[in-house]
Amino acid sequence: MAARKGTGKENRRAELGKAVERAVLVRGLEGLRLRDVADQAGVTPAAVLYYGDLDALVHATYQQAIERYSQEREEAADRFADARDKLRACIDHGVAGGPDDALTRLLFEYWPRCLRDARAAALDSALTERQIAVYSGILVLGQAQGHFLLQDPPRLLAANFVAMEDGYQMEVLAGRRTRTEVIAALRSYARAVTGHELTGPKPDDREGVDHEPDGHESDGHESDGREPDDREAADPERADPS
């Protein structure tokens, strides 16, 4: 019986977390009221308070959003053994799909609170460091596999990738740039700092997309990091429209 009660409570807490997300996206964080969350959850404000005050609920929701965003990117990159495929997947899965990208909007709605809330700032720093770690690991691997000729230390380049993404995300969310334009810009930076041209399908929406490898199948090699010379020789052919 205790297990059933615990499971039910966790389910209600998860449902409430979704209600907080919807309320933030509809009203914005700074104007958010307890009643907004209650309305989205279909309960009374008193019922919401049973699970914590508004600040605690928003903090937990932001933490969960960070985990989802980070896991999506890490899992996308982990599908591949070749660092070139990993880098393309990492870039593709980090850029918002458009102004209505709920997960990215949720993260950016919370960001201003980091300027005056130490707990929020700690979460934001953890998110940034986690994204830097993903990029840095891929760059180190690409260098070891012989695919990348890095122009600066991997961590510095990784931090630059993340900083560029953060700036461009606001452009996408504001409707001033498209996802395709931002991915093209990030791939251009990748080419400049790694010496490798990232080729592949036209970028699609991040969520639910089955990203294919970086065009290596046409070479007849598996994406396991072997035979770099043959793959490098094939790259200009894939990039050349003629």
Image (tube, rainbow, N blue to C red):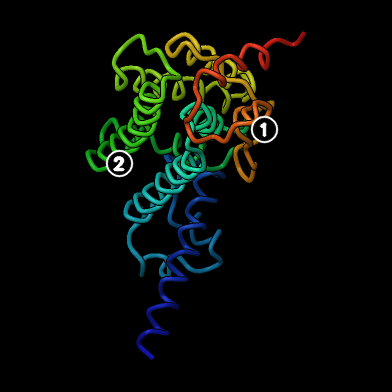
Among numbered discs 1 and 2, the one appearing first in the sequence? 2
SS category of the residue bearing label 1:
loop
Q: In x, y percent, where is residue 202?
A: 69, 26
Instruction: Tell me what residue is drawn at x 63 percent, y 46 percent.
Output: 208
Q: Nearer the viewer, residue 55 or 215?
A: 215
Q: CA distance from mark 1 to mark 2?
A: 29 Å
Q: In x, y percent, where is residue 129?
A: 30, 33
Q: Nearer the viewer, residue 183 or 146?
A: 146
Q: Nearer the viewer, residue 38 or 88?
A: 88
- Residue type marked 1: Asp
Instruction: Tell me what residue is drawn at x 65 percent, y 26 percent.
Output: 219
Residue extending furthest toward the left: 118
Nearer to us of marks 1 and 2 is: 1
- The quarter of the picture where the N terminus appears is bottom left
Instruction: Tell me what residue is drawn at x 40 percent, y 29 percent.
Output: 138
Q: Around disc 2, counting alpha carbons within 10 Å, would you say few (fewer than 14), some (14 to 19), or many (20 or more)? A: some
Residue 119 located left or right of residue 10: left
Residue extending furthest toward the bottom: 1
Instruction: Tell me what residue is drawn at x 66 percent, y 13 percent.
Output: 239
Asked if marks 1 and 2 touch (Cβ < 8 Å), the reply is no
Q: In x, y percent, where is residue 182?
A: 57, 20
Asked if 28 appears above or below 135 in the picture, the reply is: below
Q: In x, y percent, where is residue 68?
A: 46, 48
Residue 203 located left or right of residue 165: right
Q: Check disc 1 and report the residue beneath it.
A: 204
Q: Check disc 2 and report the residue beneath it.
A: 123
Q: Around disc 1, counting alpha carbons within 10 Å, would you say few (fewer than 14), some (14 to 19), or many (20 or more)? A: some
Q: Nearer the viewer, residue 31 or 156?
A: 156
SS category of the residue bearing label 2:
helix
- The quarter of the picture where the C terminus appears is top right
Question: In the picture, residue 2 is in which quadrant?
Answer: bottom left
